[in-house]
Amino acid sequence: MDDKEKDLEIIGNRKYNELKKEYLGISSVSALNTSTFKVYGTSTSLLKLQKDGLKKELKPSFESDGKGTPYLLLK
């Protein structure tokens, strides 16, 4: 794992810890870059996060990975 991957893992872990406090159904967060995150979890938590994200003028959108698992993309 190179330094960039390690940095993104740390950023993703921080975002996970931040979101997990309010959205208990969040199961994982991965950082694509310093401001874009894939958030996995229960549909209830993802929908609440999407609604709250829109209020904060973020650009949340539902996507799915190659296995068809839904996630919320936060920008």
Image (cartoon, rainbow, N blue to C red):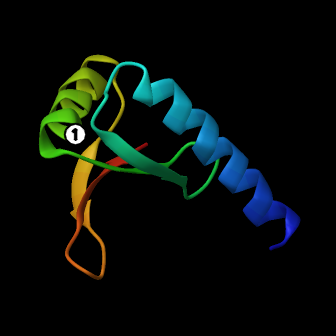
Q: Quadrant of the C terminus?
A: top left
Q: Residue at x 50, y 48 (%)?
A: 36
Q: Residue at x 57, y 42 (%)?
A: 35
In which image quadrant can residue 55 be found?
top left
Q: Secondary structure at mark 1?
A: helix
Q: Nearer the viewer, residue 19 or 56?
A: 19
| Residue type beneath disc 1 | Leu
Q: Is residue 23 left or right of residue 62?
A: right
Q: Residue at x 35, y 19 (%)?
A: 22
Q: Quadrant of the N terminus?
A: bottom right
Q: Position of residue 31 (x, y in %)?
A: 56, 53
Q: Is residue 51 left or right of residue 33?
A: left
Residue identifier under label 1 = 46
Q: Position of residue 9 (x, y in %)?
A: 67, 54
Residue 72 to residue 47: above or below: below
Q: Is residue 2 left or right of residue 49?
A: right
Residue 34 to residue 64: above or below: above
